[in-house]
Amino acid sequence: MNEFAVDRRTFDDVMVPVFSPAPFIPVRGQGSRVWDSQGRDYVDFTGGIAVTALGHAHPELVRVLREQGERLWHVSNAYTNEPVLRLAKRLEALTFAERAFFANSGAEANEAALKLARRVAVERHGAEKFEIVSFAQSFHGRTLFTVSVGGQPKYAEGFGPVPPGIRHLPYNDIAAAREAIGPQTCAVIVEPIQGEGGVIPADPAFLRALREACDAHGAVLIFDEVQTGVGRTGHFYAYMDTGVTPDILTTAKALGNGFPIGAMLTTKELAAHFKVGVHGTTYGGNPLGAAIADKVVELVSDPALLEGVKRRGATLISRLDALGKRFGLFKEIRGKGLLIGAELTTAYEGRAKDFVNAAAEHGLMLLIAGPNVLRFAPSLIIADADLDEGLRRLEKAIEQVAGASAEASQAASATNVAAR
Ligand SMILES: *Cc1c(COP(=O)(O)O)cnc(C)c1O
């Protein structure tokens, strides 16, 4: 056997064990179908965690990757490049933003946003205005600053002291936000829909209250749209459907459809507080990533595509609702566009992962968002036939888990009868 032959077991021998990947290894994808190293096919309802918005191997993206790949990959930020300038222009034409900073991930985009907010507050108001307000269950990335700002303490524990000046409030709690946001607040960071936290949409009145409190106290409002952005909700960015405009927006995940790129978008006035040398990156805004993202943004911002997201989302919700009713499975189905969370009833409490495992056995890639929520984030252009087939496979997976539970509870009650 080739000494570099690999299979799933190799992972445990060669990788830092921060992940626990599925038992199969995907090797090829086309649209919303993926094949593993054994040749089995899967319907992809995960979209690489809301990343592959245009599916796998989209022909136009492959073409841009090839063309730019043969032309220029990287020159460093000692030089600018044409693709990144076109991408910035395109994003700014679509949004409130007038300036862009490019990075390689969502965490880095948030890191830039939080550093900018701190810099703005220090320069405009002085060193005392440094408090960052964030929300319970929020997720903003895995750097030390972003895990500290994120509202899931388990991600920040065990790494020594976290940066000071961060407060966590309950999400969607207007009174708590009004009370906490004050003269000491430099920034409020919020996801318009909490993705990792369980697919929990923000109440529009809550976002309006944050906007008002930030305005009243000279704080910067940051929307983390790393998961909700680039068409995911049926709007190019989720803020566009809330009536609230942030001062800084962070975006990544679907921006490169799998090519690593992130961005911080902001206004001209705020951007002016980041002067030459104050912040930076080696790869951020490289021509290869920027060319791909430019094509992604061009394709996803098409109003017909965004309408398609809403239509598919509505179909998915109604089909999930029917499935849930049949099996007494879901307490609530929520979200927007093609970011949908289905929360399990108490009968299945804590068992989201069992459904993901069963789904894989039936040829379906599925996500969780915490222990009680099944998360759906398929390609924004998933074919109706793939959506159908994925739901058929989901039904089989549900039958398997629910059937096993029914047998287990029958066995348990049989034991009880016997015991009596
Ligand atoms: C995924 C995610 C991040 C982190 O992005 P990375 O590219 O993994 O660093 C940040 N914020 C939100 C809302 C996310 O969903």
Image (cartoon, grey):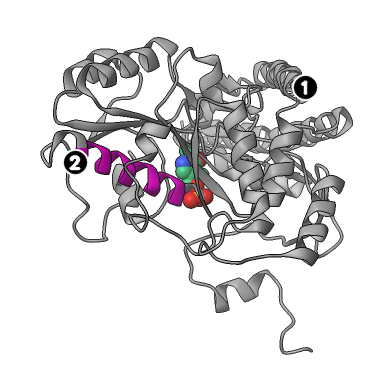
The disc at residue 2 is: none
Start and end of the magenta stretch? 107-123
What is the spatial separation of the Cα atoms under label 2 and label 1, in whole angstroms?
44 Å
Rendered residue at 21%/51% (across/down):
163
- Mark closest to the chain's N terminus, 2 or 1: 2
x, y percent for residue 89: 61, 37
Task: Report helix, strand or loop for mark 2.
Answer: helix
| Quadrant of the drawing holding the N terminus | bottom right
Tell me where residue 203 appears, x and y as whole percent. Answer: 43, 14
Main SS, magenta region, reads: helix
Residue bearing the label numbered 2: 122
Residue 36 falls in image quadrant: bottom right
Q: Amino acid at mark 1?
A: Gly
Q: Position of residue 40 (x, y in %)?
A: 85, 55
Amino acid at pointer 2: Val
SS state under label 1: helix
Q: Which residue is mark 1?
A: 308
Q: Could you tell me which residue is drawn at 71 percent across and 65 percent down? A: 72
Residue 384 or residue 59, whichever sits in front? 59
Q: Is residue 120 magenta?
A: yes
Residue 221 quadrant: top left
